[in-house]
Image: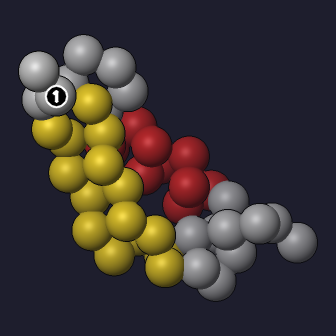
Amino acid sequence: MSLFENRKVVVIGDRDGIPGPAIDECLKTAGANIVFSSTECFV
């Protein structure tokens, strides 16, 4: 059983770091339910 299995997750990625879609794919394979995903620029 995974830590994220059957959990709702909000993903905020970083434009210069790890983008949201990349984090999405990792969490989906862990069984998470992605509720919101975005890639932001933090200056």
Judge from the rendering whether residue 41 lies leftward or rightward of residue 20; answer left or right. left
Tell me the quarter of the image containing the N terminus.
Answer: bottom right
Given the image, on which type of amino acid does mark 1 rest? Phe
Q: How many marks?
A: 1
* 20 or 12, nearer to the observer: 12
* 34 or 17, nearer to the observer: 17
Kindly give the residue lying farthest to the top in the view shown.
16
SS category of the residue bearing label 1? loop
Q: How has the structure been colored for display?
A: secondary structure
Kindly give the residue lying farthest to the right in the view shown.
1
Residue at left offset 27%, top offset 30%: 14
Judge from the rendering whether residue 13 lies leftward or rightward of residue 6; answer left or right. left
Q: Is residue 6 above or below residue 40?
A: below
Residue at left offset 56%, top offset 55%: 27
Picture quadrant of residue 6: bottom right
Q: Is residue 2 above or below residue 39?
A: below
- What percent of the width, then of the height, locates residue 42? 16, 28
Callout 1 crowding tier (Cα within 10 Å): few <14, some 14–19, many ≥20: few
- What percent of the width, then of the height, locates residue 18? 38, 27
Q: Which residue is mark 1?
A: 42
Kindly give the residue lying farthest to the bottom in the view shown.
6
Q: Is residue 6 above or below residue 31?
A: below
Tell me the quarter of the image containing the C terminus.
Answer: top left
- What percent of the width, then of the height, locates residue 4? 67, 68
Residue at left offset 24%, top offset 16%: 16
Q: Is residue 13 above or below residue 29?
A: above
